[in-house]
Amino acid sequence: MNKKPYIIFFGSASTKLAKKLAVILKLPTGKKEIVRFANSEYRLRILTKVKDKNCIIVQSTCNPVNDNLMELFLLIDTLKRSDARGIIAVIPYFGYSRQHKNFRQGECVSAEMILKILVSLGANKIITLDFHNLKNTQNFPNHFKNVSALPLMARVVAKKVDISNSVVVSPDVGGYHRAQIFANHLFNKRGVPVLVIKKQRDLNQIHKIKHGKLINNVKILGKTVIIIDDICTTGKTLLSAVNICVQQGAKQIYAVVTHPDMDSSVVDLIDKSQIVRFYTTNSIEYFNAVARNSKKIRSVDISKILTKAEFAG
């Protein structure tokens, strides 16, 4: 895709973030009209001329996930039908990314299915932030790019926490690699030991965790613990890890979660927990209002991270 000219369009879920990107990149924003019918259908119309223009769409597919996904699909299809030269879909939070494999026989691999739809509709490039499991993206090497907030979050935490007496914790086995990347940046060296908690989910009950336990020999007695995860929805995985760390003698506990996919009830649980600070990002726009009165939650701006990825590759 040619680098100029670009026009930035934004979905309903990422208005503020898209406008920040437009200001930083000094790009115009496109206009659209969206009608929501009583039966929940959408009708979308592009009001800006996009023929032979490259277009960027910014839209997190957060709650309500299916509505925001459909809006993104309609935006891509409408731009394609309007003869846009190329389309970049910037999806800071990618809904369904945790449905990345068959956990039980007969299940849909929803994350890969959505990537197929985006590409088939006409997205030339898909840019995400801390995508849950990159194995789903291997079939789309020319279309997919993931960027990470972990280096930025590590810099933020390093300014607030005494890292000389700290240990990084992954609340589940699947997040080990993520936690190791964060630890490498936090301590500015590779191979720092990371503590892992093994949890067991009850696949017959949504958001149900049977139990969790430490599975390696990293000691946390008297240490500051920093728990790393990519998404927090109900808080059960995170708070289960907090309780285990408290039982093992952690001195202080911090949490770093890229995507705050949760409501006010979970914010209350975090505020009442042993967590000293909960660091997250503005990948999910509505969360800023949800957590406005929280004493523990702090949001880190990801707009500059995304601007560096817009035109890559």
Image (spheres, grey):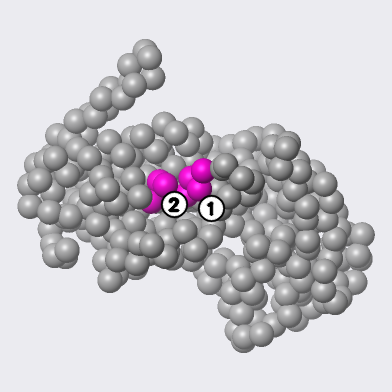
Q: Main secondary structure of the magenta part?
A: helix
Residue 311's place in the image compared with 19, above or below, is: below
Circle 1 is placed at which residue position? 100
Q: Of the two numbered discs 1 and 2 on the same chain, state the one appearing first in sequence.
A: 1
Which image quadrant for residue 24? bottom left
Q: Amino acid at mark 2?
A: Glu
- Residue beneath the point at 67% across and 69% down: 176
Q: In the visual, does 142 lie left or right of 232?
A: left
Q: Which residue is mark 2?
A: 112
Above or below, comparing residue 149 to residue 216 in the picture: above
> Farthest front residue?
105
77 horizontally vs 273: left or right: left
Image coordinates for residue 5, horizontal then vertical, percent: 12, 58
- Residue 22 in percent (x, y) is at 27, 53
Query: In terms of secondary structure, where does tag 2 sit?
Result: helix
Magenta segment: 108-115
Whether tag 1 and tag 2 are in contact, CB under 8 A, the answer is: yes
In terms of depth relative to the viewer, which is nearer, 58 or 103? 103
